[in-house]
Amino acid sequence: MGRCWLGAGPPQKKAEKSGQWETWQVLGEAGRTLWMGGFISPRQASSSLSLQTEVFQALQRLHMTIFSQSVSPCGKFLAAGNNYGQIAIFSLSAALSSEAKEESKKPVVTFQAHDGPVYSMVSTDRHLLSAGDGEVKAWLWAEMLKKGCKELWRRQPPYRTSLEVPEINALLLVPKENSLILAGGDCQLHTMDLETGTFTRVLRGHTDYIHCLALRERSPEVLSGGEDGAVRLWDLRTAKEVQTIEVYKHEECSRPHNGRWIGCLATDSDWMVSWADCWMGWQLRALSAVGLWFTAGDSHLSVQVCGGGPALTLWHLRSSTPTTIFPIRAPQKHVTFYQDLILSAGQGRCVNQWQLSGELKAQVPGSSPGLLSLSLNQQPAAPECKVLTAAGNSCRVDVFTNLGYRAFSLSF
């Protein structure tokens, strides 16, 4: 390059017989935009676009946040959605192979799925469903793996006004009725029939936007939590709210300096833990808090764990009383079960391992400064790909083949 220039504003366009004046923007300290420029020869001009593309991609990765993850039906692939509206598909089987190379940890394919962030994703037997601002889209897993990333359909819930475009923070599959529940910025739960694509009901009760959903399959009931600080239990048969717990109103759980919000819930009745003969399980969502429900049938004890702004707390569900306060000060943004442990993550690099009694067993560091999403791949079709993945405030997805250490990271 010939004469170069660096300044706080765009230079005047110039030209020389020996070449042309090339300018581009770079991000300086404190978010200031700086401009760089210089005279380049015709030969240099041919590679200029490539250089600018590389710089732009490097800046994108530097400021990337991964909000959501979803494992493929076969268990061998992982989808990750970021704040730029991109979805990347990673091959877990290739990355875990004994012959894996650095290239194996890169996406098989990356495509632009939404105009804004990809806040939530879930997978059906054939489809990947992704949600962003105001709409949900469907993609065929088989086509994506062939790098044919064309959306199958898109749907928008019936919002109150045509100008309303709220973010969709949570997606939840209800297999028994082949439906999808969506919730987010409009403070409502919307149910969509996956067969017809029509919206069949709206559940109203939250007074601020909703962060998370979880399903009690045997009931059938749905749990929701959000900015209003309430965990609400809904009966899908009657479309009525049947229970509300306002966590922040309990003195032992309240942390006013963090706020009252509840950010994620999880429940499942397929896992039995020998603790007070309670049936427990998991289903996870990555967003801006932590909450976890332990649920049981009529003949068993029912308890819950929830948090976010309030402390991470173990609750007795029927009496709505807290029983154990977990000793962690930072707000947790995701939680799930693994064997006889509770795994949580949030502010900070570590995945925390808790005993059900509230004792902190271990903290395993990852590569991201903050974590928003945990995903346990327990697909029976691919036992060799049984891993925990964690993602958040970086372009990397950490992979844990066991809970003792981070094995490696996938990267956009």
Image: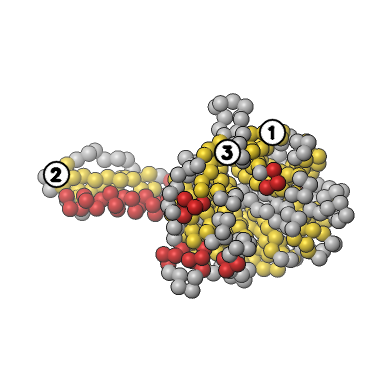
- Tag 3 secondary structure: loop
Residue 409 is left or right of residue 22, and the answer is right
Label placed on residue 16? 2
**Of the image marks 2 and 3, the number of the one nearer the N terminus:** 2
x and y percentages locating residue 309 in the rendered image: 69, 48
Q: Residue at x 49, y 52 (%)?
A: 142
Q: Which residue is label 3 attached to?
A: 167
Q: Residue at x 61, y 57 (%)?
A: 374
Q: Nearer the viewer, mark 2 or mark 1?
A: 1
Label placed on residue 201? 1
Q: Is residue 105 above or below residue 229?
A: below
**Of the image marks 1 and 3, the number of the one nearer the N terminus:** 3
x and y percentages locating residue 270 in the rendered image: 74, 58
Whole-angstrom CA distance, mark 1 to mark 3, is: 19 Å
- Tag 1 secondary structure: strand
**Of the image marks 2 and 1, the number of the one nearer the N terminus:** 2
Q: Is any part of residue 311 visible from this angle? A: no
Residue 136 is left or right of residue 63, and the answer is right
Q: Nearer the viewer, mark 2 or mark 3?
A: 3
The quadrant of the image that shows the C terminus is bottom left
Whole-angstrom CA distance, mark 2 to mark 3, is: 49 Å
Q: Nearer the viewer, mark 1 or mark 3?
A: 1
Q: Is any part of residue 294 visible from this angle? A: yes
Whole-angstrom CA distance, mark 2 to mark 1, is: 66 Å
x and y percentages locating residue 10 in the rendered image: 30, 40
Count of all numbered marks drawn on residues in the image: 3
Furthest residue in direction left, as rendered: 17
